[in-house]
Image (cartoon, rainbow, N blue to C red):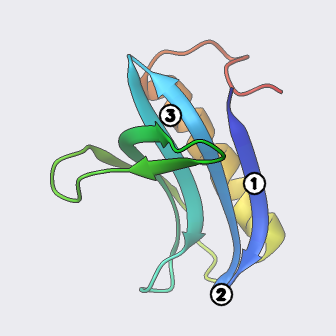
Amino acid sequence: MIKTFLKKGIRGWECKSQNVQANGVSYEITTMKMHNKKIRCIAQAGVYEDRGDYKIFTFLIFGDARMYLSESTSTRATERNIEETHDEGLRNFRETFNLNENFFKI
């Protein structure tokens, strides 16, 4: 089950979709303001590990796949800009893996 969270972080708003499965691989899709002041949506491949009361997402920095899905033209990490960039990134992710259009519907 995919879970999406929108929260205010240190660098402004950020959005994260967890437990996204495509072609047998787990992805975590995150949209946030990067150190270079750009807002980007990134899909990171990795593994979810169940630790009893919680799950953690681990990945190899130079080993697991990372995809840049979308980038905002704005540098302000407002709630609206983050949501729009994240939605565009999810659409691009769906198109990349040929997933049906209801894949991210809740």
Q: Residue at x 48, y 78 (%)?
A: 34
The quarter of the displayed image where residue 52 is located = top right
Q: Is residue 98 above or below residue 28?
A: above
User: CB under 8 Å between callouts 2 and 1?
Assistant: no
Q: Which residue in the structure is indicated by mark 3?
A: 93
The quarter of the displayed image where residue 49 is located = top left
Give the mark, 3 or 2, whose residue is nearer the N terminus: 2
Tell me the quadrant of the picture where the C terminus can be found: top right
Question: Residue 8: x percent and y percent?
Answer: 77, 76
Say which amino acid is labelled 1.
Phe
Decide which of 97, 75 is in the foreground and name it.
Answer: 97
Q: Residue at x 50, y 50 (%)?
A: 56
Say which amino acid is labelled 3.
Phe
Question: Residue 36: x percent and y percent?
Answer: 42, 86
Give the mark, 3 or 1, whose residue is nearer the N terminus: 1
> Relative to residue 93, is residue 103 drawn left or right?
right
Residue 72 appears in view: no
> Relative to residue 67, is residue 73 drawn left or right?
right
Question: Residue 29: x percent and y percent?
Answer: 54, 48
Q: Residue at x 38, y 16 (%)?
A: 23
Q: Which residue in the structure is indicated by mark 1?
A: 5
Q: Residue at x 24, y 45 (%)?
A: 64
What element does badge 1 sit on?
Answer: strand
